[in-house]
Image (spheres, helix red, strand yellow):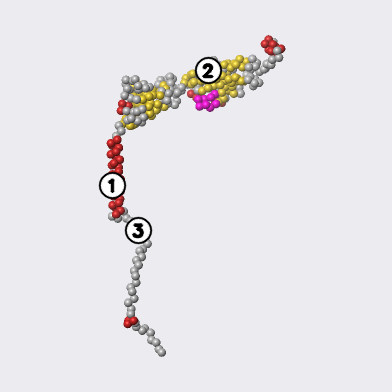
Amino acid sequence: MASPWLVLLVLLGGQVSLSGSYEVTTSTPKVSVRAGAAADLFCRYSADFGEPRVEWKFKDLEGSFRLVYYNNQITDTYQGRVDFSARALHFVKTLATDSGEYSCEVTTPDGSQTDTVKVELVVQVPPGLPMAIVPSSVVKGSMVQLQCTETTGYPPPNFRWYRDGVLMPEKSAGSASFRNSSYTIQPGTGELTFDPVNQADNGEYMCEANNGVGPPTKSSPLRLQVYETNVGGIVAGVIVALIILAFIGVAIWFAYRKGYLGRKTSDKPKVIYSQPPADTTDDGDFRQKSSFVV
């Protein structure tokens, strides 16, 4: 029997879409599980007419899109690990790469209406060992930055720093143990910045990563050595270098003047021009060498 409301709308001249409309909702807008555990992403909808077309899409943390359920089947990437039901997407076993945003898209049978609900899946992964980047030696009075990185944990961890085994507060100001230091720590990025660095900052530094999943992890300790700026030594070094360069220049000049270095000579033989002797023969010395017959 037709709905009284439908009969009323027809009598009033209204038009009703035979495809109906869908209101898509979820009871799990955000799901958090440990890596390897199961997870259910719910997608609920109410239909006036007919069975809708349902698709699940995935956008990973890098922003790339992928189909999970399409054309009434689980795609090859998720075969054997994910199951589909009319109201949920079930992960038998989650992986770290499953973290991201899932979209449940519901379309009426004739394709005239589509509604979507999104579910965030957080696959928790404990942090690995962080890596601390600490310069071995720095000059007193300069700005120095130490870095701590960790890339496997999810959600991304926060970082803390230790000097000689003592936990450093985020800011040195107001700390009795670090009142002679001037630094700041950025927990989200792992940066420890001294501005300026001084002798009190000498020591061994290590960093710690923690995202609330499993125990915190610490890097290996690395030593930071702060040196005084030796202006007198730098000037003396420059003077000595100039004296050495001057001595080398004089030695080369002296060797050249004495011919020790050898001068470039031509392979062609030398031609010496000499003026021929003047003709000293006079008439008295003339001797007739031929006879004339008259």
Is the residue 284 above or below the residue 182 in the image? below
- Spatial CA distance of label 1 from label 2 is 81 Å
Residue stretch rendered in magenta on the structure: 58-65
**What residue sits 54% from the left and 15% below the top?**
27
Instruction: Tell me the amino acid under the disc marked 1.
Output: Phe
Q: Nearer the viewer, mark 1 or mark 2?
A: 1
What residue does disc 1 label? 247
The answer to whether one can see residue 173 in this image is yes
> Within the magenta stretch, is there residue 237?
no
- Spatial CA distance of label 3 from label 1 is 28 Å
What residue does disc 3 label? 265
Instruction: Tell me the amino acid under the disc marked 3.
Output: Thr
Q: Nearer the viewer, mark 3 or mark 1?
A: 1
Q: Secondary structure at mark 1?
A: helix
Q: Secondary structure at mark 3?
A: loop
The number of discs equals 3
State left or right for residue 110 relative to residue 65.
right
Number of the label disc, if any, that sits on residue 81: none
Quadrant (top left, top right, bottom left, bottom right) of the N terminus: top right
Tell which circle, 1 or 2, labels the residue nearer the N-terminal end: 2
The reply to whether discs 3 and 1 touch (Cβ–Cβ < 8 Å) is no
Tell which circle, 3 or 2, labels the residue nearer the N-terminal end: 2
Residue 63 placement (x, y as % from top left): 52, 26
Q: Secondary structure at mark 2?
A: loop
